[in-house]
Image: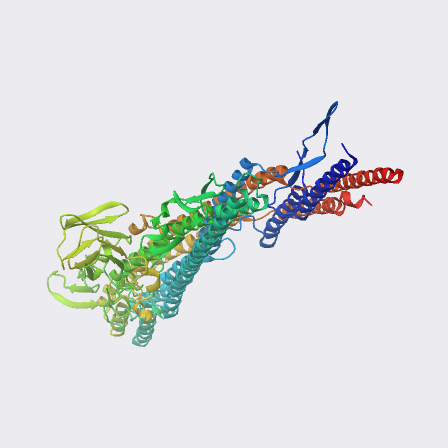
Amino acid sequence: MRVNTNILYNQIVDSIAKKNKEIYEAHEKLTTLKKVNRPSDDVTSYFKASNYKLKLSNIDQFKRNVNYANGSLSFVETQLNDLNDSIDRVIELMTLGLNATEDSVSRNAIAQELRHISDFVLGIANKSYEGNYIFAGFKTDQKPFPLINSLYSGDSGHINVSLDGVSFISINITGDKLFSFNDFASTSLVTPDNKYIYYNPQVDGSLKIEIRDTDNTTVLKTIDVANVMDGIYKLSEAVGKNDLISARALTEVISYAKNKVEIAQTEVGTKLARLEKQTETLDEFDFIYKKLLSDVEDADVTLVASQIASIQASLEALRLSAAKIFSQSLLDFLR
Amino acid sequence: MSILSIFDIGKTALMANQTAISVTSHNISNVNNPDYSRQEVVLGIKTPIKIRGGYLGRGVSVDGIKRSYDKFLTDMLINQENMLGKSKILGDIISQIEEIFNEANRSGLTGTINSFFNALEDLSSNPSDITKRTVLKNVAEELISKFKSMEKNVEDTTVNIKFEMGELVKKVNSIGKEIAEINKKITQLEAGGVGQANDLRDRRDALLKELSGIVDIKYYENSDKAVVVMIGMRNLVSGGEFNELSMSQTFDGDIFKLDGIDISERISSGKLGGLVDALKLINNEVLYKFRKLLAGFTNEFNLIHQLGYDLNNNTGNNFFTPLTNIYYEEHSQLGTITAISVNNYANLKFDEYYINIKPGNTYEVVNNNAVILSGSYVSGSPIVFDGISVTISGAVNPYDSFFISPIKNFIKYAGVNINDVKEIALASIPNAPSDNTNLLSLLDLKQNPIPALNSKNIYDFYNDITSKIGVLSASASDNLRFDQTLYNEISNRKNVAQGVNLDEEAVNLIKYQRAFEAAAKVIQVANELLDTLVKIV
């Protein structure tokens, strides 16, 4: 091969350009700390990375959902605990009130406390969290029980929040489940003095109580209970008036309420436990996907640094040899 | 046989070596000219004269100046320049486009789509929260403006491509003219077969190479030593004649005409071919799909949003600005589109259509080369397909055509249709501010396939665009590397045959200088001989 001045020159220029490009690419990896800096660097890895990033962003969002659900369910839980305590106190007071030996002074005191409790429970029923009435279903912009004898004005809507894109958790308990009598079973019972008490739940969620005489026909009294608070209120009236048969009839309302609160507490407790578990799962996935992402897109800094050093060395050698070749020609010797 | 003839012999040697030194100098001075072919003096023996006892030499003659030239390698290099021209420009443009879509080191469009869905999901726990609703609206606006700015960036690239095409066409014409001029000179100089116009030929080869880098050419040398240069079977240059290449824009794309004939189909490589390909790629693969993406997604989002109730208990609202502005082009003398509108948003496929008029006063609606609807043409009667209603009025003729695109201007008119954030409809029943059922349906669009997006979800459809660009960019840079290596290889081989080596020329310089000195000595000796004889007398 006949080697010419230009071939030598081109070869060296090309080699230097190639080495410079290699240095540029290695340096890009070093500054971004990523081995994939654009789709064409490695299409598969780029899309794997993009997919992992999407997963991570979703996980972030689910964590936020879980946090919010946790906050609002914890708030519900607190309300349920208060409600449970109130109902326990009602049961205590009711036992005292039903005791015929109590005098009128203490009966009045019991009646007054029961009235206070009915107000307190009404307050719980109309509690709001971040501006929304929590026991109103979807109709969170209005009080579910504006008055003590109001029927439930919310709906049965469950606010569902996604935990992982597939499963959902509802973050509210609707007021009808706690304070109305939709689930009350139609029943009747006989009192020790052989009178009859009939319980008829109505479609509007209220409860009609009929007290019949020993003949099981003559209606002695009808009590319409709009909701649990109303039941407590009416209980206080009955105790105040020493109307023992009415008070006796209303005890079923209180135990129904107690039962409902306990069910709700269990439900909320289970959900909170699930949320806790979900947080752990999400953290785990977060870790896994971060690891996967790092595997596909992060540059091995040590490797890149050593690459740069080796390219640098060969570039220097190239410059040195180029300088030697070009510094002299035959003309230098023909003097 | 006289002493004087020695003078003559010395003179021929002086002249020949002097010529050789000037050729060597010419070589040395062109050492860095890549288009130059090394030249050599071809020396011959002057016809001897017959004397008693044999023939006596009469010295040396310069028979010619030969160019070290390898036609095969030169042709290969010219051809490779054509491939390289295309690879270079395609690589450049695709990597520009790739950078627009590159999200490796910044959040990009995927990030914004994520933020949009996350803002929506944040509302799921408290759908009536005004602050969170405002965040959603802002993120939606950001999403739209991201689409707009990305579209603008891609469109800017196409504007640059068109400008560059125009410049290249000018360049082709100026090179064509120059080749025609050189042809004339070469024909004149080489007439009669006296010798080759070496330097002009080098210049002409250089121009052919430059031209080949721009556009696919075919060329040959005719009997007048002039080259005929053809693009797409039409002559750009023929001898001293030159035809102009022109470019014009029509709705079918850019039309290149040479000598009045459309040769667009024949332009497939070189820089110009690369630009044509790049433009097609950007229009068909990038802009088309990118516009379809936003149009298909926002329409689907609107359809679900319309089903919901907002905080004012209204229903049927659009979240994003719906399609109203449908782009169209009329290619008919008398027929015009008098009305065009969306007939059913749920049927929109966001594709592009041609309504072609056929003989017998009928029409065909064509989408992706398939006829999707046909019928008799009735002036003023609406033609309805894929959710669009088009009314054409006036007399039409066969081969009239109307182009309809619901996506071409979509991004330009895109926006968020919500003024007051209370209008965001997240409930599926009225009077239920915390009802997030419709919100959850909207959220499903994150993974649900969207019919207008070839039944892919928004992320997958977008990834298709990016991965296509990524693959193309990777293969473009592979091609470039290959073509560049091949080019360098051929160039080196050509250099081996035609290039100048300074050391070699230095040796030649000394060689011819010594010969010149010796020839001068011959003359001196002849002179002394003559002197001796004169002194005798």
Residue B407 screen position, x and y as percent:
31, 57
Dividing the picture into quadrants, the one containing residue A108 is bottom left
Residue under the point 61% across and 45% down: B36
Q: Position of residue A240 (x, y in %)?
A: 27, 74
Q: Is residue B134 above or below residue B287?
A: below
Of all residues shown, which one is farthest toward the top?
B53
Up-down: is B172 above or below B313?
Answer: above
Location of residue B311 (image quadrant)? bottom left
Report the residue at 52% width, 45% height from top. Answer: B188
Q: x, y (%) of residue A107?
A: 30, 73
* Image quarter (top left, top right, bottom left or bottom right) of the C terminus of chain B: top right
Placement of B309 over or under B446, stated as above or below: below
Q: Nearer the viewer, residue B67 or B350?
A: B67
Q: Residue at x 72, y 41 (%)?
A: B17
Visual colour scheme: rainbow
Give the camera-side residue of B9 and B412. Answer: B9
Closer to the camera, B123 or B182?
Answer: B182
Say whether residue B225 is left or right of residue A23. left
Q: Residue furthest front?
A: B537
- From this viewpoint, is residue A65 visible? no
* Residue B311 located left or right of residue B31: left
Q: Is residue B442 visible?
A: yes
In front of the other: A326 or A108: A326
